[in-house]
Image (cartoon, grey):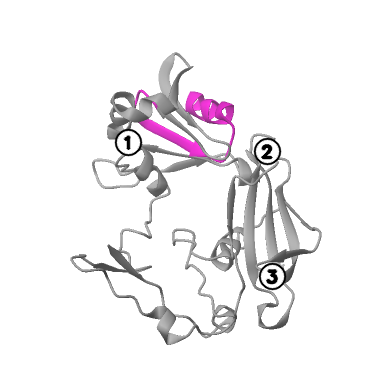
């Protein structure tokens, strides 16, 4: 059993809303506020922002910000919907974030509040938890860097799928590179251990073999995230189409 302790609230607008935002892109987005802050905090000229129809989230009225790629044909993201509260203490607070992939009617990823929201600190009784008899409790503090939850590697999510990923060269210098811009960005890093674990493990059924510039690789594909693992041990990933990853890999061979 793991006991997670959230970061302390600041005195800024996030504390006023009673919701702590994640600190930086590598923190874990535990709330719609945190995820929305990450998304909206990195808007560029390649992004279109419009206002959608009014909605209700967890019984609370909200308006929608529609965030979409502009001029990024290879991006897998169609648009992102951010529902912003419009009533009482929830005014201006992101209540729900939904990410839609191209060609899909339902969100590929959605994070939001459900039930009935009650702004303000919860009753003390709701914060008390007694572990069951015989349980071993491991306490981790989010954002401390040692919790194993908030990582610093852009490939941290891949560890859960493919095993360890270490984008650091023999001399200890990072070899993470980027190509493309904005929504069409491809991130690449070396990982010799990764290819073997995918080829020999049960996840081989979730990948398909592709040939790029005369070299074989394995492609893990979802509606949003695509990952290309080349035989050389280099990994390419991004919220882009498989062809964009193959183009990046071809340019690097």
Instruction: Return the x and y of residue 215 as percentages of the image width and height.
Output: 41, 17
- Residue at the image position 28 percent from the left and 27 percent from the top: 196
Q: Is residue 146 visible?
A: no
**Could you say which quadrant of the image residue 26 lies in?**
bottom left
Q: Earlier in the sequence, mark 2 or mark 1?
A: 2
Q: Which residue is mark 1?
A: 191
Residues rendered magenta in the picture? 230-253
Give the percent coordinates (x, y) of residue 172.
Answer: 26, 47
Per the image, label 3 sits on a secondary structure element best described as loop
- Which residue does the image show at 69% across and 70% down from the upper left? 59
- Residue 250 on the magenta segment: yes
Q: Position of residue 217 (x, y in %)?
A: 41, 22
Q: Quadrant of residue 7?
A: bottom left
As measured in the structure, the alpha-carbon distance from the residue carrying label 3 to the one carrying label 1 is: 46 Å
Q: Quick one: 244 or 53, which is closer to the camera? A: 53
Residues marked 2 and 1 touching at CB (< 8 Å): no
**For marks 3 and 1 on the same chain, the one whose residue lies earlier in the sequence:** 3
Up-down relation of residue 244 to residue 210 (above or below):
below
Mark 3 and mark 1 in contact? Answer it, CB < 8 Å.
no
Closer to viewer: mark 3 or mark 1? 3
- Point 18% across, 65% down: residue: 134
Q: Residues within 10 Å of mark 1 (few under 14, many from 20)?
A: many
| Residue 171 in the figure: left or right of residue 215 | left
Q: Nearer the viewer, mark 2 or mark 1?
A: 2
Residue hosting label 2: 104
- Mark 2 or mark 3: which comes first in sequence? 3
- Secondary-structure class at tag 2: loop
- Return the residue at label 3: 59
In this rendering, would 62 be left or right of 192?
right
The quarter of the rendered structure image containing the N terminus is bottom left
């Amino acid at each position: 059993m793991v006991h997670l302790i959230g970061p302390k609230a600041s005195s800024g607008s996030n504390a006023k809303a009673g919701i702590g935002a994640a600190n930086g892109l590598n923190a874990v987005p535990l709330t719609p506020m945190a995820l929305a802050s990450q998304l909206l905090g990195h808007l560029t000229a390649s992004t279109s922002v419009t206002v959608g129809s009014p909605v209700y989230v967890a019984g609370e009225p909200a308006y929608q910000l529609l965030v979409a790629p502009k001029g990024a044909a290879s991006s897998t993201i169609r648009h992102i919907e951010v529902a912003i509260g419009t009533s009482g203490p929830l005014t201006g607070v992101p209540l729900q974030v939904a990410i839609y992939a191209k060609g899909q009617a339902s969100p590929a990823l959605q994070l939001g509040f459900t039930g009935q929201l009650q702004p303000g600190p919860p009753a003390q009784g709701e914060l008390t938890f007694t572990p069951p008899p015989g349980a071993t409790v491991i306490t981790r503090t989010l954002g401390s860097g040692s919790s194993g939850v908030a990582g610093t590697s852009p490939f941290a999510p891949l560890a859960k799928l493919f095993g360890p990923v270490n984008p650091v060269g023999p001399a200890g210098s990072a070899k993470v590179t980027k190509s493309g811009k904005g929504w069409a960005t491809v991130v690449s890093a070396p990982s010799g251990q990764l290819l073997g674990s995918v080829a020999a493990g049960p996840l081989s059924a979730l990948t398909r073999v592709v040939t790029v510039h005369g070299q074989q690789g394995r492609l893990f594909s979802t509606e949003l995230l695509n990952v290309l693992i080349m035989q050389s041990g280099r990994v390419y990933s991004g919220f882009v189409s498989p062809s964009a990853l193959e183009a990046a890999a071809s340019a690097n061979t």
